[in-house]
Image (cartoon, rainbow, N blue to C red):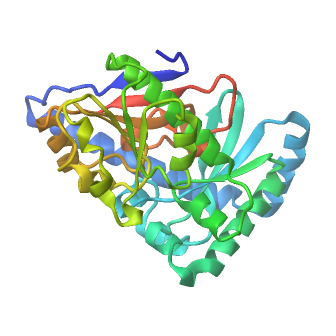
Amino acid sequence: MNRNVSIQRRSVKAAPSVKGAVKKSSWLKTVKLHTRRIAIEMLNLLINHDLLFWLVGLVNKKVNLIESVFLVYPANEKYGLAYVYPFRLRWNQWNPIPGGLLWQNGKLTVMFMISATNGQFTDPQNTENLRRMSDRMERLRQLFGAGRKTFAGIVPGVLYAGKIIREAPEADLTAHAVAQAIDSVKAEESLGDDTPVIVLGGRGFIGRRVVGLLEDSNVFSIDSSDGQGSKDWPNYLRGQRVVVVNITLNNALKDYLDVIWPGTVVINEVYPEPNSAILEHLKNNGCSCYHVVGVRANAFPSFPAAYHGAIPCCAAWPSPKMKVVVRRIV
């Protein structure tokens, strides 16, 4: 198994036997939620000032501690509210605000957040908002004296396609992380190197890079965007064990559940992780499912749900000691 990939298994917790335990658990979740939200509000009150960023940048140019600035956004309102209060979601739709710090392999990344979502990024009416957002992140990179700026989710692909940015380092790093995860999951599932790999989104911004890295393997690229979808599915492989990798949209797996046969190993890289209905279907169909959590690092505040204990691949920097975290969820 690739030593730079850590595979975790979802722990199964026994159900509390008394109501007090349930209340305690709910109380702790509430405390953690408000602690996270208040920490971000305090960050904005105390440090969201360009003069302070510039002063930090002067120091960073001497100590070289801050490697990158990173922009994250919520896939849905649930994730957004895991970090900030409702009024903040409305205010910072396109205005990056400090969201936390990421510590990976001896370097810091300063994380910023907006509340816009996928549908808004692809709306042509928001082109100017995207340009202004990207310019702001470049300005922040310069203020901090960081070497990199990166974006989460579909943002780098949208910015690149719109010629707002000319390079997307997060895409290459994510592709390498996914390729490592595939090798590691194959080893975990006792699958041979020649096991077929079906890539959902294989012609996409990151998907085509993954397919390129797997060029010596038995790879099939599937894209719903080309109008074919499951019509291109390699059904002649039915009965064989295959790996299905989702590198497109969160709900893409739902569109292919009817053609995924028993024994298939699914790897999800997309944010957020598959919902309970999809996982239940895979489980009932005798399939296993792994989620690429990200890169081993510390985050303050920590990422919620399936991303706890790591940072997104797109937020990482290419350290030689970088370790990819994969979690089995079915």
Residue 127 vs residue 285, the one in the foreground: 285
Classify 27 as above or below 196: below
Q: Can residue 312 be seen in this view?
A: no
Q: Quadrant of residue 164?
A: bottom right
In the rendered picture of this protein, how many numbered marks are placed on residues?
0
The C terminus: image quadrant: top left
Q: Quadrant of residue 317?
A: top right
Residue 47 vs residue 77, the one in the foreground: 77
Residue 228 in percent (x, y) is at 33, 62
Residue 105 in percent (x, y) is at 67, 27
Residue 153 vs residue 205, the one in the foreground: 205
Residue 22 in percent (x, y) is at 16, 38
Q: Which residue lies furthest to the front in this view?
A: 236
Question: Which residue corresponds to the image point at 43% horizontal and 43% vertical from the top-left?
Answer: 269
Image check: 148 left or right of 201? right
Residue 29 in percent (x, y) is at 31, 43
Question: Which residue corresponds to the image point at 13% horizontal and 37% vertical from the top-left?
Answer: 285
Classify 28 as above or below 263: below
Image check: 24 left or right of 191? left
Question: Which residue corresponds to the image point at 69% horizontal and 60% vertical from the top-left?
Answer: 48
Q: Residue furthest bottom?
A: 125
Classify 116 as above or below 281: below
Q: Can residue 15 be seen in this view?
A: yes
Classify 129 as above or below 59: below
